[in-house]
Each structure stands twice: as C-alpha cells, then as structure tokens.
Amino acid sequence: MRVASIVFASPLPQLSKEFDYSIPSSLEEKVSFGSLVAVPFGTAKKPKTGFVVAIKNESSFAKELAEVSSVLSESSVLTIEQYELCKAIAKRQAGLVGELLSTAVPKLSVRADKAFSAVQPPEKIPKQVNTARRTFITPGLLDVEEEKRWTTIFLKIASANLAEGRSVIIVAPDFRDLEVLESVLTSSSLSDKAVRISSEDSLTDRWKAHLRASSGETLITYGTRGAVFAPSSNLGAILIWDDGDDSHFEQGAPYWNTRDVALTRSELESCDIVFAAHSPSAEASRLIEIGYLQHEVFESSKPPVRISVSNERLDEETYSLISKILSSDKPVLIQVSNLGYASAIACLKCKEIRRCQDCNTALWIDPNKVARCRSCKNQFSSQCECGGSNYRSISVGSQALTDQLSRSFPEANVIHTSGLERITRIERKGTLVISTPGAEPSVSGGYELIVFSDSLNMIGMPRLRALENACSKWANALAKISKTGRAIYVGITGDLADQIRSSNFHEIVHRDVLERGELGLPPSTRTLSITSSSRDDLKIMKEQLTELLPEMRLVAETATTVAFNYSIASGAETAATVSRSASDLSRASKHKKPGQRVFFVNMDDNKVI
DNA sequence: AGCACGCCGACT
DNA sequence: GTCGGCGTGCTC
C-alpha cells in the first residue's frame, strides 16, 4: 500500500501540516508529487482538495488512513522547488505554508486543464551546479537610450539563459511596467517562449499559463509579484524590476515581498538574481554596500535640472516655460503628490502655505476647526509664524491643479492621471499631464519638461522611507523625459539639491542608508510589526516577546500595533519565536472572533516607521 | 473550514 | 426530564 502526504492551501493553523492518505491501487499511476487531489476530511461531506507533497510506503500516523478520493488534474501542478520555497518563506515570515500555496498555484480551471496538452515531452536537462551571480543593474536613465533600457537588458539576459537551456522568471511591480516588458517580449524572437503569470488574467488563462510553466519546458515566465513563486524548470535567473516599489509587497499575511522571496529562491535553487532600478531600494543599496550584489551601471546622459526654491507650487519662470513648450506642441509632465482636491491653508498676511514644523506637509483645517498636519496629525495654533491669523483655503490635490491649469492653458490638452486611471500612453503633442507618482503615462520621444511640484512634501513626510521612495518616484518619471528635455524640482534645498541636480539617486539613497545604519534602523535591521484588534492580547504578546527576545527594540506603538527592530542575523530565531507566541496566544485568546485571526504578524514591515 | 461532542439554561 | 445554545477540539 502506497501512502501520499497531502497539504492544503488553507490559512488555518490547525491544517498547517501534512496529512497522510493511502492511495487506492486504481489511482496509483496518476498520483505523484504535485498532484492535485481530492480527499475526505473530517466529517465534512464534500472532499477537500490538496497537493501531494510526498509518496511513501508507510505512514507514522497511528490510526487507519483514509483514501485519496480522486485526482483533479492530469498534470503535476506543484513542483518540489515551489513547495520548498513556500516552506522557507513561511518560516522566514512567521506564516503558514498553506497561505503561500495559493500564490504558487492558481485555482483549478477544469476546462483549461482538460484542454491542456504539454507542447513537448519535457527534455530532461541535468541542472548544472552553477554559482549564483547576484547583480544590481542601474540602467540608462533616459528611455530614449534603447540599448540601455531595463527591458532590453532583461531580454538579453533571458535570451542567454534560454540558449543554455535555463528558464528565467521576470517580475515587474504593476501592469504599467508589465505592459512595457510584454511589448518588448512579444515583439522579440522569444515571444513563443514567454508565459505571463498575472492575477489579472482569467481563471482559465492563469491555469493554462501555470500548466505550461510546470511542464518542464524552458521558458521566460513573467508577471507581477506572485510570479516569483511560479513553477520554472531549471531556473537560471530571477530578474526583478524596481524592487523597492510598493507593489512588490504582498498586503496580506504573511506579508512577503518579491525581493526577499527571490533572494531565498536564489539560495535554494542557486540561480542568478538581477535587480534593476533607476533608483535603488535601501535594501538593494545595502546589499551592494556589503558586497552581496555586484553593481553594474549603464552610464547614461542626465537631463539638465533646475531647483526652484519658490514657495509657490509653480513659480513664474516655470509657468512661462510650460506655456512655451505647450505652444510648441510638445508634452509637459507635472508630478503632484496628492490625489484629488485636498485642501491647504495660506496665510493672508505673509501669503505662504502653512506647513507642519516637523514634516513640512501642508496643514489643513480639520472638521473641528483645528489647524492640523495631514501627515503626522500634529495640531498647530491658529496663528501663523508671521503673526497673521486669517487664512484663505486653497486646493492642492492633483485634480485641483488640473482644474486650475486647464483654465491657465485653455489651448492645451490637460490630462489628469493617477493610480485610478489606466492611461499608460499618450500621443506626442502639446499635452499637459498632471500625474500622481508612478502613474505617469509614457509618450514616444519623451516629455520636454517634467516638474516635480511637490518634491518638498514627498521628502518631508515623517517616514523612514520618504527619501528613498521619493527618489524612486522621481527617477522613474525622469526616465520618461526627452533627449532635449529638462526637469524642475520645487522646494529642494541644501545638500540634497546638489545630488538632485546630477540625478545621483544612488548616492542619495546610499547616504540615507548609512545614516539609518547609525541609528540601528532598516535596512541594517528588520522591522517586525504585530497588529491585533484586541488590546489585551496585544499587550500580552508585547510582554512575552520583550521577555523572550530581549535584543529587540520597540520602535513604534499604537492602540492596535506594536513594532520592533531586530537584527538580520537573528531573523530565523525571531520568526520562530514570534510564530510560536502567536499560535499559543491565539489559542488562549478570549477575544477570538469566528474566522478572524488574533494577530497579524509582519516580519518586514516597511511602513510602520 | 466544517462538524461533532459536551455541558448549562428554558421548555412541552 | 429533553431540546438546543455555541465554546472546544479534531480532522490523515
């Protein structure tokens, strides 16, 4: 009698282990590692679906085994490498394997499964033991430099791997970048080797793509963050565009991110890693600093930059430049940090917008008629520093600016874009685009002028990663500038202004990382956050962890969240301890709500400080 | 997640 | 006496 070990794609801690079932002789031929099977479970009427993760001759389970009911897919749908990766990430993130399996394997589409036939019998290429090369690439800043684009560079690396029988996985943050990558892939000679893994595709398309990626064929598998878990035969390299982008972070438990999963996978499968970004994430910068990543730079021309120290969002000079460029029928981009019609207050006496003394964010009058910072919520006196106490409210959001500029430039075509709209491309003419960071449409030939109208706001936010994020948003927008284009930053002063003038984002982030390091802040440490709706449970958790892990430093605390910094070296121990405490305390909790977890554990919180 | 088991209050 | 509330615990 043969025995199959089964795991379930379930977020329940009780189900987070392998269950043994006997394999009826009628199914013996069809059941192997990675099979999707239905099994009876408990007293439930309908069978549960699970993955076969081991075939054994006997079980250590004391009682009699139940039988596998049926096999749901002809193919093996979970590879050994995927399962090992899920286990490693679950451990690292103090989460459960079951939570990750549904990322690694999409939902079954019966129709697509029946229609699928492997293109070719998977040719068995023995995996060569290669030493993984790990690099960070700074591509050319300007998109017009075609051979220095990230897509061109990635395609070249992919092509080299494919030529030697190795697959690659390419991950991009969102649909905009994916669209750019896809157009390059599909117009290349490798188009029939490219498979998209995207959560936005239909069920049948996703299953079809998954089966193909599992088939053993040598492929370029590309997609958004989930693709880092995709099946891939003889994986040669994982290529990641812009690893610092927020979209690379999973927003639900166990809060993994593309970068860390890729690094883990690279260790497990000894495949190469290539990160690329116009401005590095703090983590990548640190990995370069310690020599873990080799830094490769594609030297590139940089646009001329002007710094405007005006308090106005758009000063006279900028205004007339915009006007001039629009009337010569060339496109202009204005990057704004806030969406919509957010309001601010300007003092009637000194005419300046009142700003928070800590973070420089514009103040507003809250519903209780108190002057308050939007970002850190501090209250301020109703009196301006100049002594004035009368205000006029003004609108500062992107929509408000769009309205205002539509009136100022009635001749021009004024477009507003944000994460909510899906404008990825505009025609090259006298168009004025007002965009929130990251939503800038591309235009062939590039923008003739880019204005970063809220640069002061972006770096002034009282967040650890404000500067790093701002650099990334600026650099990605700058990449859309024309050969003859120029950029204007509003409100930057001091040392930073010098670096900005030369678009030296690498140096800015590098310095930021060094400063953070002196304070013991990430990326030289990691941040753990625990959220719970129960104050009692959170308090016990905090006390318990403080006692069990005395090295950890409390860095943030609110009514629902506690956050600690811990050393990178203690990561495994920390995750294990947190994991154990969370499951013990959840079981003992008096505040359990049906189907709701007591603690949300994030081993790498990038927002809480 | 389901589902059964089990131990206290209100009912024909 | 028994019906049924949902807290507790198990499912190979």
Image (cartoon, coloured by chain):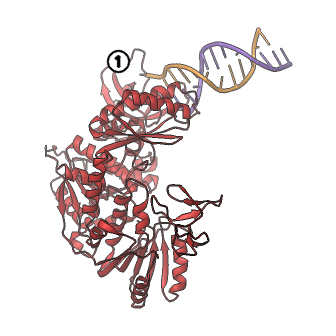
Chain colours: A red, B purple, C orange
* Relative depth, front residue between A341 and A54: A341
**Crowd band around label 1 with a 10 angstrom C-alpha radius: few (<14), some (14–19), many (20+):** few
User: Against A325, is A302 above or below?
Assistant: above
Quarter-wise, where is residue A255 in the image?
top left
Q: Position of residue A561 (x, y in %)?
A: 49, 41
* Relative depth, front residue between A327 and A216: A327
User: Against A180, is C11 above or below?
Assistant: above
Q: How many marks?
A: 1
Q: Is residue A24 left or right of residue A394?
A: left
Q: Residue at x 25, y 67 (%)?
A: A504
Q: Position of residue A209 (x, y in %)?
A: 36, 53
Q: Quadrant of the N terminus of chain A?
A: top left
Q: Position of residue A273 (x, y in %)?
A: 22, 52
Whether residue A119 is visible to the viewer of this picture, yes or no, is: no
Q: Residue furthest front?
A: A387
Q: Is residue A45 left or right of residue A33?
A: right
* Relative depth, front residue between A405 and A35: A405
Which chain hosts label 1?
Answer: A
Whether residue A83 is visible to the viewer of this picture, yes or no, is: yes
* Relative depth, front residue between A341 and A356: A356
Q: Position of residue C7 (x, y in %)?
A: 61, 23
**What secondary structure is found at the residue carrying circle 1?**
loop
Look at mark 1 in the image and give the residue it sits on.
A60
Q: Residue at x 19, y 67 (%)?
A: A298
Quarter-wise, where is residue A160 in the image?
bottom left
Amino acid type at circle 1 is Ser
